[in-house]
Amino acid sequence: MSEATHSTRTARFEARIKKRYAAEKRFKFIGLGAIVFSVTVLAILLVSMTMNGIGGFQRAELTVPVDFRTAGLTIDAERLEDADAVQALETAGLPMLVESAAEEALGAEGAQQLGGDAWREVAQAIVADPALLQSEKTFHLPANNAFAAALRGEGREELRPLAKQLHDKGLFERRFDPGFLARSDATDPQVVGIWGALKGSILTMLITLALAFPIGVLAALYLEEYAPKNRWTDLIEVSINNLAAVPSIIFGLLGLAVFLWIFPYYRSAPLIGGMTLALMTMPVIVISGRNAIKAVPPSIRDGALAIGASPVQVVFHHVLPLALPGIMTGTIIGMARALGETAPLLMIGMRAFVATPPDGFTSPATVLPVQIFLWSDEIDRGFIERTSAAIIILLIFLLVMNGLAIYLRNRFEKKW
């Protein structure tokens, strides 16, 4: 027996074994290399975005103390509760008051470097707290874009000495800008914000979810539980699988040709954007839903039928609740993909300049990826930083959605 075993360990046999082990090692190192490469590229992306994005959450601000007690600004308190309170303060002379206070604090040249709409931030502060009119308050107001560039050592050289002088006095600094999360698009990078685009994204995603989820789940249930097995069903299944791989811009062309033909007055609206993205997300939900339904053991169905449940009760009382975690996971991943899409929304006109947040599903709006795309076309350094900051917000949004998918899968996952 020992001789027979020994005879199989020939030199040729040993060479083949050695060759197999070497191939296994190569495969292992290649896989490890792929992971290292992916992690490195991701790290470069995140570090690059973070380095540029940190500046995007800041803006150059001039310090302007305003003493309203001696300013002589008179306005009826009731006007501050009206919708046009900011216009009322403008009529009462607030812009000139802010300019006068800026000249006193910064000098005539420094006051000229205030942003054109800086007084509006003072007006909004007064509207939020009318008691300010009886006190003195120090405001940090945005400088104009040229003076902000001078603080970075860029742009017009003649402004740099004044920028350095005010910076040394502590009157001109880059500060964290919480308004970046609360404002909308603008032509000046000093006063842009992402709230308008973020709200547009949220409204668009609500339309997408409301359309894609019920239709996708019902289609998955029918195909898996009720559809006859014939060539037509096979054709539908193959078509759905192909639709999941169709480039997103094709869905944009479809939305342009169909939805805007039906609703011609809702161009650039979350309604049309959501309907277009629903077409793109639906195949993903159908495929993930069918896989989740298929994973429910047949014994669950047999047991329910054995105790007298009807086929509809079996589906909606037993199969669907057990498959729902898998369906929800696929839905959230599909929604995360839709959230990051740009091409189909460009086709339906959601690249318009929208300076106010949308009021509803039919208001003109843009979305976060399109806003990033538009800002990335700007050559101003301020917009480059704002673009990186907006990308960070979008990545955080996507990470939250993917984290939610993982939580739901682990929380409600059933094992048989």
Image (spheres, rainbow, N blue to C red):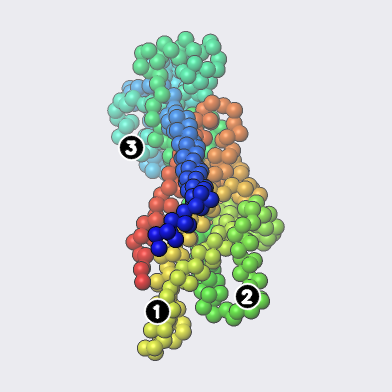
Please name the amino acid that badge 1 sits on: Ile
For image coordinates 53% across by 31% down, the residue present is 383
Question: Closer to the N terminus: mark 1 or mark 3?
Answer: 3
- Res 236 seen here: yes
Residue 1: quarter of image: bottom left
Please name the amino acid that badge 2 sits on: Thr
For image coordinates 54% across by 53% down, the residue present is 338
Mark 2 burial class by Cα count in 10 Å: few <14, some 14-19, many 20+: few
Residue 396: quarter of image: top left
Q: Secondary structure at mark 2?
A: helix
Question: Closer to the N terminus: mark 1 or mark 2?
Answer: 2
Task: Report whether 252 appears left or right of 178.
Answer: right
Where is 192 relative to 2, above or below? above
Q: Secondary structure at mark 1?
A: helix
Task: Give the alpha-carbon distance from disc 1 to disc 2, as whole Å.
Answer: 25 Å
**Residue that label 3 marks:** 129
Q: Secondary structure at mark 3?
A: loop
Where is 117 relative to 184, above or below? above
How far across and how far down the image is residue 258, in percent? 68, 60
Front one among 64 and 277: 277
**Residue that label 2 marks:** 233
Where is 114 relative to 229, above or below? above
For image coordinates 51% across by 78% down, the residue present is 225
Q: Nearer the viewer, mark 1 or mark 3?
A: 1
Numbered label attached to residue 236: none
Task: Give the alpha-carbon distance from disc 1 to disc 3, as whole Å.
Answer: 62 Å
